[in-house]
Amino acid sequence: MSTLSSVRSFGRAETPSFSFGRAVAWLAGAATVGIEAVMTRSELARSRRQLALLDDRLLRDIGLDRATARFEIEKGFWS
């Protein structure tokens, strides 16, 4: 067998186009991304609820006015 023919046969790996392991890895990755997105949005919602509890003096301390704070507080969960 020549070197060229052995390289050609090596390049044609006989693997199926569908791999159960790849499918499971893809699903696990998608689930991880989804969970991280929900956790991030939950943290933002919690921060907005805490922002709503601050008085004007504390808002000035962090550089916000009441209108800006209200705008942030009224954002939805997925915003």
Image: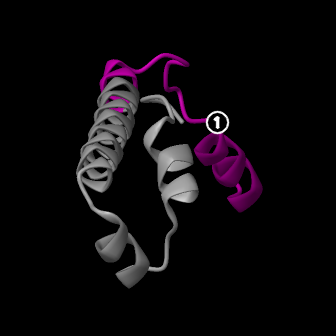
For this rendering, which residue is in front, 65 or 21? 65
Total of numbered circles in the picture?
1
For this rendering, which residue is in front, 58 or 45? 58
Locate residue 43, reporting x and y percent: 27, 47
Residue 54 versus residue 53 in the image, above or below: below
Point 42% across, 29% down: residue: 77
Locate residue 66, reporting x and y percent: 49, 58
Point 26% across, 60% down: residue: 54
Q: Is residue 74 left or right of residue 50?
A: right
Q: Residue furthest right?
A: 4
Q: Is residue 13 left or right of residue 28?
A: right
Quarter-of-image position of residue 29: top left
Locate residue 21, reporting x and y percent: 31, 27
Q: Residues within 10 Å of mark 1 (few under 14, many from 20)?
A: few
Q: How is the image coloured?
A: one colour
For this rendering, which residue is in front, 59 or 15? 59
Point 57% across, 54% down: residue: 67
Tag 1 residue: 12
Quarter-of-image position of residue 34: top left
Which residues are drawn in magenta?
1-25
Does residue 17 belong to the magenta stretch? yes
Does residue 3 belong to the magenta stretch? yes
Residue 65, visible in the rendered structure: yes
> Helix, strand or loop at disc 1?
loop
Kind of residue indicated by mark 1: Arg
Q: Is residue 39 left or right of residue 56?
A: left
Q: Main secondary structure of the magenta part?
A: helix
Residue 1, visible in the rendered structure: no
- Name the quarter where the C terminus is drawn: top right
